[in-house]
Amino acid sequence: MPSKYIEIELNTGFWKITKEKDGSKVIFESSYLPGGYTKSFLIQRLQGLGTQQVMSELKNFVEKP
C-alpha cells in the first residue's frame, strides 16, 4: 500500500500531573493528523474513544489499594 494512504503527519502530546491540596490534577493534551486519505470524522471518533479509555484506565490504576 502506498505510504500516502497511511502516513501520519503529526502525532504529539504531553501529560502534566501536579499535586493539589485535595489530590492531583491531570492534564493530557494530544495532537494527531493522520495524513493520507483517512476521513476526519473517523479519526475524531477514535480519538475520543481512545482518550476516554486512557483516562478510565488511569483512574482505575491510581485508585487501586
Image (spheres, helix red, strand yellow):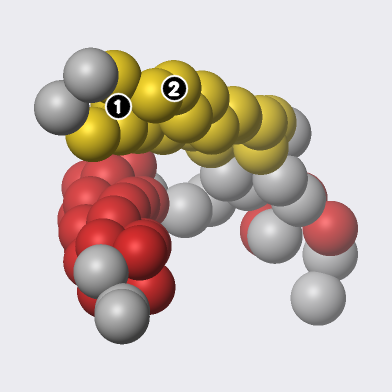
Camera-side residue of 42 and 22: 22
Q: Residues within 10 Å of mark 1 (few under 14, many from 20)?
A: few
Q: Quadrant of the C terminus?
A: bottom left
Instruction: Determine the secondary structure under disc 1.
Output: strand
Q: Residue at point 39% right, 24% down? A: 19
Instruction: Determine the secondary structure under disc 2.
Output: strand
Numbered circle sitting on residue 8: none
Kind of residue indicated by mark 2: Thr
Residue 12 higher or lower than 49, as above or below: above
Residue 20 in the image: x percent, y percent? 29, 19
Residue 19 higher or lower than 4, as above or below: above
Disc 1 + disc 2, Cβ < 8 Å:
yes
Is 43 placed left or right of 17 in the picture?
Answer: left
Mark 1 lies on residue: 25
Mark 2 lies on residue: 18
Residue 4 higher or lower than 58, as above or below: above
